[in-house]
Image (cartoon, rainbow, N blue to C red):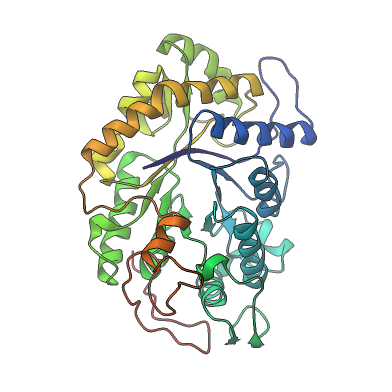
Amino acid sequence: MQFGIFTVGDVTTDPTTGRTPTEHERIQATIAIAKKAEEVGLDVFATGEHHNPPFAAPANPPVLLAHIAAQTERLVLSTSTTLITTNDPVRLAQDYAYLQHLSGGRMDVMLGRGNTGPVYPWFGKDIRDGIPLAIENYALLHRLWREDVVDWQGKYRTPLQGFTSTPRPLDGLPPFVWHGSIRSPEIAEQAAYYGDGFFSNHIFWPASHTKQMVQLYRRRFEHYGHGGADQAIVGLGGQVFMRKNSQDAVREFRPYFDSAPVYGHGPSLEEFTSQTPLTVGSPQEVIERTLGFRDYVGDYQRQLWLVDHAGLPLKTVLEQLDMLGEEVVPVLRKEFAALKPAHVPDAPTHASRLAAAGGGHDATVHGVDDVTGASPEPTDTTSSTNTLEVTT
């Protein structure tokens, strides 16, 4: 199982000091956080994509991730999320394949729809087209990584004739794709149709909602012939804040929670921690709460936490990472490994997928699913339409 962190890159005033970091300071802090994640033994660092204040997350995540790749050795670099709706799939295909080469395969990508209405018209799109944009754009992106020459025509962008996306994926193996969502069953359906991973954000909603979303994805993954429901590739988000005991953690984190731009000014910290996976307490409480996720989502492959949100100073964030690396993750690795049945797959990596595909250069077999080897259901090879069913 993979453990790591994700960031939304918010630039937020520290409510305890009144100081707001500059964009430059926030960006540099993000790089320091990623490097610390590798230092303490975490597996994954993921960044969000934002195009507006109060965020300094990259508008083009491969820029940040390539920079981090050059300063790390084993950290898997990902996104949380990349917008499949407002980005051109041709640009996504080329940028992330380039990142794949620069990182030596230490990357994957999480695609999402985006739910901020004003962002869509900035890129000439309409949020009311969010679902069909996600379906059409990913259908094209999926082909661009798997076919050397693509002829394509759809509704939302100009046609392609004899187009080759460059560079080609590293070792002929497209980047692994997660589809990330907070509340969209359509995104879970899309992930299941392609046999890709499904990442449930798992921060703002109660466990019952996450359970329903993951169960839907698992059922549909099996329906489309990629393997058993318990072999589907699932990731979870979450947020933690730790101190040696609960009282200290709650006292220190409360002003940050109350002022947080994402979920502040709503339910109290106590209400939120009782109704959602947000965990504020001791390392042992984080361990117990995280192990409990398996009770309602089953065995899963990736756990990411948000640790740098709401104006927390860099020093505090690095302390959180020390506790994750020294006290929390080693226990979770051991416990989750002991519970996982042998037939449940590990989190896909470039190395593991390359070995499964034959181990050599250009090892991909066109038309064969990257995760399980199952043949996906037929798609129309000349347009964006396919047999993906939007089932709630």
**Quick check: 361 left or right of 283?**
right
Please state the horizontal and vertical placement of residue 329, each as a whole percent of the image: 40, 29
Which residue occupies the foreground of this view, 4 or 219?
4
- Image quadrant assignment for residue 93: bottom right
Residue 220 is at least partly visible in this image: yes
Viewer-nearest residue: 368 or 376: 368
Rendered image quadrant of residue 284: top left
Q: Nearer the viewer, residue 131 or 382?
A: 382
The residue at the far front in this view is 360
Residue 245: give x, y in percent of width and height: 41, 10
Relative to 314, is 216 above or below? Answer: below
Residue at image coords 44%, 22%: 326
For image coordinates 50% across by 67% down, the residue present is 173
258 sits left or right of 270 in the view: right
Query: From the viewer's perspective, is residue 194 above or below residue 381?
Result: above
Quarter of the image with the N terminus in it: top left
Is 44 placed above or below 33 here? below
Residue 203 visible in the displayed image? no
